[in-house]
Image (tube, rainbow, N blue to C red):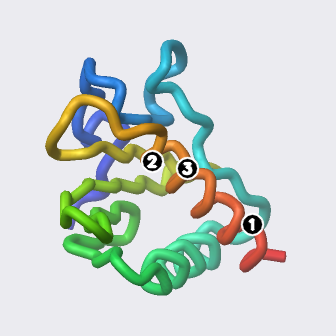
Amino acid sequence: MTDKTAADLAPTSKKPNCVSSVVTAGKAAIAPLSFTGDAAAAWIALKDVIESQPRMAIKDASANYLHATDTTKLVKFVDDVEFLLDDNVIHVRSESRVGYSDWGVNRKRVEMIRAQLAEKLQ
């Protein structure tokens, strides 16, 4: 399988229910997941974090790309979460499939994953 690039992540929606580290300005902008040390170890740690989430499921994974879905607890809406390993960062994009606003859920999800990944890599 060919390595993916940041351009391969789905485009950022105009709706306020999407965050992406590929965009650098606006409400959708969020910092990529950063790490020091071995990229392969960080990638494995990220997969462990994703697999430990109760409503997340990995749908596609390669050496540098991961697509997961997260199903909301109450109404069972599905959100798409993508990760891309790119040198010393992991780009991330998280977006709700339906609706307009997500009340910050996608941003909170990414920040929770960031914190758990940092803890796992200590």
Q: Earlier in the sequence, mark 3 or mark 1?
A: 3
Residue at position x 26%, y 54% from top?
Answer: 80
Q: Nearer the viewer, residue 15 or 8?
A: 15
Q: Nearer the viewer, residue 20 or 95?
A: 95
Q: Earlier in the sequence, mark 1 or mark 2?
A: 2
Identify the element where label 2 is drawn. helix
Q: Position of residue 10 (x, y in %)?
A: 23, 39
Q: Quadrant of the N terminus?
A: bottom left
Residue bearing mark 1: 118
Vertical order, 10 against 113 (above or below): above
Q: Position of residue 59 (x, y in %)?
A: 20, 73
Q: How many marks?
A: 3
Residue bearing mark 3: 108
User: Can I make out residue 68 in this image?
Assistant: no
Whole-number angstrom distance, CA of label 3 to CA of label 2: 5 Å
Whole-number angstrom distance, CA of label 1 to CA of label 2: 20 Å
| Residue type, mark 3 in image | Lys
Residue bearing mark 2: 105
Whole-number angstrom distance, CA of label 3 to CA of label 1: 15 Å
Does 11 sit left or right of 34 as displayed?
Answer: left
Does 57 sit left or right of 43 as displayed?
Answer: left
